[in-house]
Image: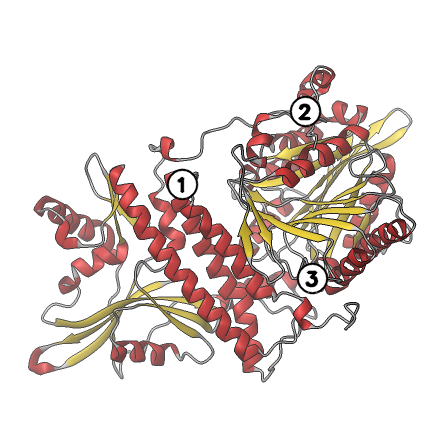
Amino acid sequence: MSHKKSYKKDMYINRELSWLAFNERVLAQSQRNTTPLLERLRFIAISGKNLDEFYMVRVAGLCNQMAAGIRQSSDNYEDLSSLLEEIHERSSRLMHTQQTQLRQLEEELAKERIEIIRDPDSLSRNDKKWLKSYFHNNIFPILTPLAIDPAHPFPFIPNLALAIAVELIGKKSKTLKALIPVPTQIRRFHRLPGKTYRYMTTEAIILMFMEELFPNFTIESQGCIRVLRDSEIEMHDESEDFVRYFENSLKKRKRGAVILLMVEKTMPRQLLDFVKGGLELEIGEVIAIEGILGLADIDQVLNSSHQDLKYPVYTERHPERIKEFGGSCLRAIRQKDIIVHHPFESFDVVVQFLHEAARDPNVVSIKQTLYRTSNESPIVEALIEAAENGKSVTAVVEIKARFDELANLKWAQDMERAGIVILYGLLGLKTHAKISVVTRKEEGGLKTYCHFGTGNYHPVTAKTYVDLSLFTADPQMGQDALKIFNYITGYATPEKMAKLSYSPHTLKPTLLKDIRKEMENAKVGLPAAIWLKVNSIVDKSIINALYKASQAGVQIDMIVRGICCLRPGVPGISDNIGVKSIVGRFLEHGRIFCFANGQPIPSNETKVYISSADLMPRNLDWRVETLIPIENETVKAQVVEQIMLAYMRDTFNSWHLLEDGIYQHARPDKKPFNAHRYFLENPSLSGQGQLRKKQRTTIKE
């Protein structure tokens, strides 16, 4: 049997199941003794939030396909019914593991005088007295107990909301069913008084004082429920008013079909049937949980006074090169390119770049993309300041950024009031590229200064997301960036680009061309290798090209944080491909592509790119993304010899993907190498300035 065959469905790992494997790796961080205790709790919360979003978007999409009569997944050609069954079964196991791990952590937390009170009977008389007063002053006024009968229909329960379902018996044995929505306007976990840190959930406190909500009734049965709804916004490009359409769609999101109903395992069957009937559960699944529903909120227990139970505090470095130019980003960039490695190097450099441009009298214009940003955004503040100082400012605000649509609409309106030209991208495409272009009057004409990022303009997530920021004054890169803005703002498709590639037109063809070049080099005996780092790889044309490259003898090493549909190590197909996932203290988010280009990696000939795009059809075909070549010698050495080699050497945070789709944690030796720790402790090459002449901190294999 020939191994060189057409790639059938067994050659691709299912996207949804691969994502669940990623969330299992996230949860595994809560089981590692090397992870500080409260950080272990945080990883449980992260895995809970991840799973919520997975159901609200991915599972919702599959359920809608089923409801529409579609029986096969378009991505994986699999039976949807069987796939959904496996997803629910595996998700149920994951939720069970979350609860088991939480209980184990609670035992260790108790030794540190941190406790989640589950049994009210364990409380002292004074605790109960205090809780009663707290309940009346802080919870009772915003509770609305809702009886359900012909005059009181089953109420709407919003997405991500909790409620308590109860069955009551009143006078003359009259039965009554009711719901108590748990208010979302207050914290979920409430701290009890005392020197120790003891917490109770809102629902646990409500259950303690149920008789005050239903006087003259006896509680027959009760149970907590939590609802997840379809949260995908269906796009209609023919909408006359794009912004108003989105505002209305966001309101409808809260009322999407129920995709997952989480219930306490102790809820009686009769009460569960009542809830399912009231929610009109048609396409959703029910998962019974023994423990606390909605673990995304558990991070409220992470108290700042327990710093010894968290990761050590670190100080973000500020590039020495910028300090050498009196703190001027523009002067430092004018001399040569610089790349900033977040969060190890401060995101303040990006903010400073824009503030400096806003205040420089010679700067005439700023063009900026915004996909996600923070509530109190210094980026937006800098753009508003620039507009108020008379600069021409254009901002492309992507309001289709999932779950950040409302915040982006608000910022767009604020900026528009300040005189900034606001655009909402192209119909049918999300603008996911991270570009900022500053144009300045200088001797000889106008000069461009660009920032290209792999991550969002978000100073909060920049403290935990590992990303790259390239600053350059290369005139060809600047012209290319301006052409991309013209494409976004005026549908002016660039006829020719000097250096940048972009989706949906040239990014994927550029990558495929470089993969083919490695194949050609391998066939004539030249060194041939590909290193790449992405968050996800799903696109089949890219996967098939990598399979062919492997068969041609190209050595391919991939670092894929999350979804990986490529199956490595298959004899005759992908036996020259290795895949590993890095999951640690920081969230890997940067995308890097390295091609040997006829010489062993690393070398001066290595072709290197950074990108805003993952290798997914949505990024390559349905978004505006950028692929940025790294040409400066120092910057290239930093990306390849520092960053990528550190990931290759990592044995502390690495999980290796096996041929059968299972991930196996790396077995570190006596001195495990932790890439994140290396980045924390070593300055980057392009940011060292004169220090680099004294110290070179690349990694040698």
Residue that appears at 40% across and 61% down: 95
* Residue at image mark 2: 697
Please say if 359 is above or below 512: above
Quarter of the figure with residue 160: bottom left
Q: Which mark, by number, is residue 570? A: 3
What's the amino acid at mark 2? Thr
Is residue 194 at least partly visible in the picture?
yes
Which of the marked residues, 3 or 1, is nearer the chain's N terminus? 1
Residue at screen point 56% across, 71% down: 61
Q: Quadrant of the N terminus?
A: bottom right
Neighbor class of circle 1 (other Cα within 10 Å; few <14, some 14-19, many 20+) is few
Q: CA–CA distance between discs 2 and 3?
A: 37 Å
Mark 3 element type = loop
Residue at image position (53%, 58%) is: 21
The residue labelled by disc 1 is: 33
Left or right position of 622 against 255: right
Question: Is 288 situated left or right of 622 in this image?
Answer: left
Q: Nearer the viewer, mark 2 or mark 3?
A: 3
Residue 288's spot in the image, x, y percent?
A: 34, 69
Q: Nearer the viewer, residue 38 or 480?
A: 38
Counting residues from the start of the chain, the first of labels 1 and 2 encountered is: 1
Q: What colour scheme was applied to this rendering of the protein?
A: secondary structure
Q: Residues within 10 Å of mark 2 (few under 14, many from 20)?
A: some
